[in-house]
Amino acid sequence: MIETAPNRALPTAALSAAEPLVLAMNLEQARLNLHLLLLEEDQATLLLLKHCLSQLDNGLDIWEMVSDKTSPQIIVQGVDFVQSNLVQTMQFLLNNPVARSSLLSLRFLSNFLIEVSDLCQSILYHDSAFTSYLHKLDQAAQTLKVARQKMIAGNTGLVAFVAYKQKTTVLSFDDLVQEGVIGLIKAVDRFDPYRGFQFSTYAIPWIKQAISRLIVKQEKIVRLPVALAERACAVFEAMRNAYQQTERWPSVEQLKLLCDLSEDEIKTIRNYYQATHSLDEVRDNAEEEGQALMARMKQQQFALPMDDLIERNLRQYLDRVVATLPEKEAAILNMRFGLKNHTETTLQVIADQLQVSRERVRQIQNEALKKLKNQFGCDLALFLEPNDSYENE
């Protein structure tokens, strides 16, 4: 039988001095207790895995269920196997300690564990053999729900703070707060207090992202269809990735292939951002024009995480993350993304400084980013653009 997690929460006496930390630690303890309890009973473990795989099969992103503590590779690879034969899956889990332990090492999100607990209650309630277990499961789930709600309620001030700084004539303050709470909830479910970072440092970018996306949708609705405004993100990302790969800005024809958009859609996006130069005019020797176009797109739609790093606590966070890398890898990331001086450096310039090939710099960069993503997961995602894929350069 798997033992319940030890109580690692701070004493109640310390609540006034460290309330945010206490709330976070109590939430993490409640989350871990429910996680362990679900793995204590074979039927519940099977339902957990089945629900996870079912959600993946329905198109839900793995990071909506798991924060990156270790690789969820076994779950992703097992989709077809589990869906095809439930009995074999149970035998596989029960007889394969490695597969079973992988579920323990994964850090399932609180909201997902609560869903699985409710699923167990609805499916196993009719079997008297599970009466005692379901009672314990219900208590653990209720404890987690209360701890989660306290964590959310205790940090709504962060939402008000961010919403006030991002207020707009298009949306009311209450609308911004309501959307910001969605970002706060995502941060609450993903935050791990034992990594040593302040919750506010972790949560503010999530809140900003939620509010910024709402503002984008509302401000663009008259002049640009919402669906197209959202797809503008793909154009922006493709431009950035193409420049990182080739150090040249892509043409409209290239963007059509990269973004799966029509020429008219790309031109509509381009015209909306009021670019003074056509994307077709961005040639090999027109880097300034390309940079200017990117800057306009950034300013008008995208609150880039790198810009947020100017704030001291966020910069300290990323500095600590990068500092976990070997010296050369850390140096390359610092130069490549301008983490120290806010000035990004090309692969070729870095290669010249280090007296290695440009391709070698790219390899080291990609290896370093993979290490950080594997180790810090959702934390690091706060500071990288959505769906960034440096490893594919």
Image (spheres, rainbow, N blue to C red):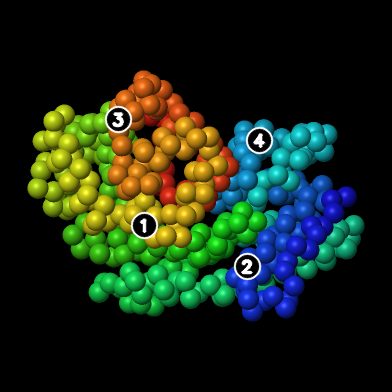
120 left or right, relative to 257: right
- Secondary structure, mark 2, is helix
Q: CA distance from mark 2 to mark 4?
A: 33 Å
Tell me if 4 is positioned left or right of 83 in this view: right
Q: Amino acid at mark 3?
A: Val
Q: Nearest the camera: 19 or 389?
A: 19
Visible residue check, residue 309: yes
What's the distance in space between the residues labelled 3 and 4, CA to CA? 40 Å
> Which numbered marker is on residue 349?
3
Is the C terminus in the top left, top right, bottom left or bottom right quadrant? top left
Residue 338's disc number: none
Q: Earlier in the sequence, mark 2 or mark 4?
A: 2
**Mark closer to the chain start, 4 or 1:** 4
Amino acid under disc 4 = Ile
Q: Residues within 10 Å of mark 2 (few under 14, many from 20)?
A: many
Q: Which residue is mark 1?
A: 310
Question: Which element type, helix, strand or loop, lies under badge 4?
Answer: helix
Q: Earlier in the sequence, mark 2 or mark 1?
A: 2
Q: Residue furthest right?
A: 129
**C-alpha gap between disc 2 and disc 1:** 24 Å
Q: Residue at x 31, y 37 (%)?
A: 345
Image point 72% across, 62% down: which residue?
29
Mark in the foreground, 2 or 4? 2
**Residue positioned 67% across, 72% down in the render:** 146
- The residue beneath circle 4 is 74
**10 Å neighbourhood of mark 1: few (<14), some, or many (≥20)?**
few
